[in-house]
Image (tube, grey):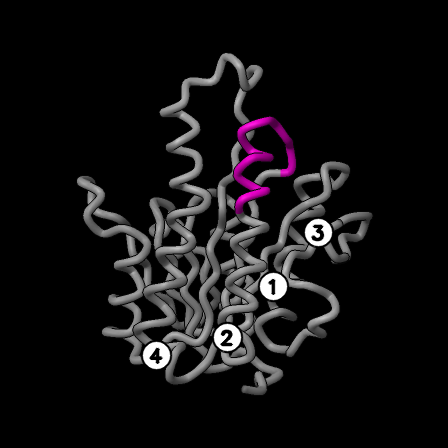
Amino acid sequence: MAHARTLTGRVVLVTGEGDLAVALATGLLAHGAVVALAGPDAGEIRGAAPPESRLLALVPAPDGTAGPALAVDAVVGHLGRLDHLVNVVAARPGAGPLMELDPPALQRVLHRDLVTPLACTQRAYRRWMAAHGGSVVNVVAETAGSGPRNIALGGLTELTEWLAAELAPLVQVHTLMPSPSLGTAAYREGAARVLCDLLTLRTDPADGPVLVLSEEPACPSMAA
């Protein structure tokens, strides 16, 4: 499936929380996409959305029943399609050495940063992309590192490589992550630019599915 070189009319679901999720969703709206933002910060984007843009804000219920995977159903039901899925992966650094880490805390990290993106991808594939194609991009939010974070990122790298191979060529799968040397502001700006490129252009398979943003201004390279 060849991607169009514009996002106009294309439906993009962004899942996750924090400033990066809002910034990515706002950038996609500015490029003409129809955007659904699913996460606790979804309400904040209404005021920042460009005029005449099409936005669906999906704020989870307090009891957590409207999880990110179920947001896929809402998007397909309300907007009629789902061309692209963008999972903002928190990958927050944890304090302290691994030997002092409470195992249930690591379990929560892995569920948030691995299980949830996988569940969203599975639902998007089954509800729309298996029949129509599309793309999935996991965008890692934090630039700082730690033991638990790096464990989650290692798993996310493996998950991305397996899904990219399993779903190709119908669905492209990528993960975008920052180099530790890249500042937060530069990463946010570079991630928004590279994300639009990944959603509108077919990438060279030789580049690999995991991309690391480095240098100033941020530019992507293959993960080692």
Where residue 163 appears, as percent x and y from the top left, is 51, 63
Quadrant of the snapshot with the N terminus: bottom right
Circle 1 crowding by C-alpha within 10 Å: few under 14, some 14–19, many from 20: many
Hey, what amino acid is under mark 4? Arg
Q: Nearer the viewer, residue 84 or 62?
A: 84
Q: Residue at x 57, y 16 (%)?
A: 97
- What is the distance, in whole Å, between disc 3 and disc 2 at their CAs? 20 Å
Q: Are marks 1 and 2 in contact (CB under 8 Å)?
A: no
- Which residue bears the numbered disc 2? 171
Hey, what amino acid is under mark 3? Val
- What is the distance, in whole Å, between disc 1 and disc 2 at their CAs? 15 Å
Hey, what amino acid is under mark 1? Leu
* Element under disc 2: strand
Give the foreground label among 2 and 4.
2
Tell me which numbered mark, 2 or 4, is placed earlier along the sequence.
4
- Which residue bears the numbered disc 4? 81
Q: Residue at x 29, y 74 (%)?
A: 76
- Left-right relation of 21 to 70: right
- What is the distance, in whole Å, between disc 1 and disc 3 at their CAs? 12 Å
- What is the distance, in whole Å, between disc 1 and disc 4 at their CAs? 20 Å
Q: Which residues are magenta?
A: 143-155
Where residue 38 appears, as percent x and y from the top left, is 35, 55
Tell me which numbered mark, 1 or 2, is placed earlier along the sequence.
2
- Which residue bears the numbered disc 3? 212
**Mark seen at residue 195:** 1
**Mark seen at residue 11:** none
Give the foreground label among 1 and 2.
2
* 49, above or below 106, in the image: below
Give the foreground label among 3 and 4.
3
- Left-right relation of 87 to 144: left
Where residue 113 appears, as percent x and y from the top left, is 46, 43
- What is the distance, in whole Å, between disc 2 and disc 4 at their CAs? 15 Å
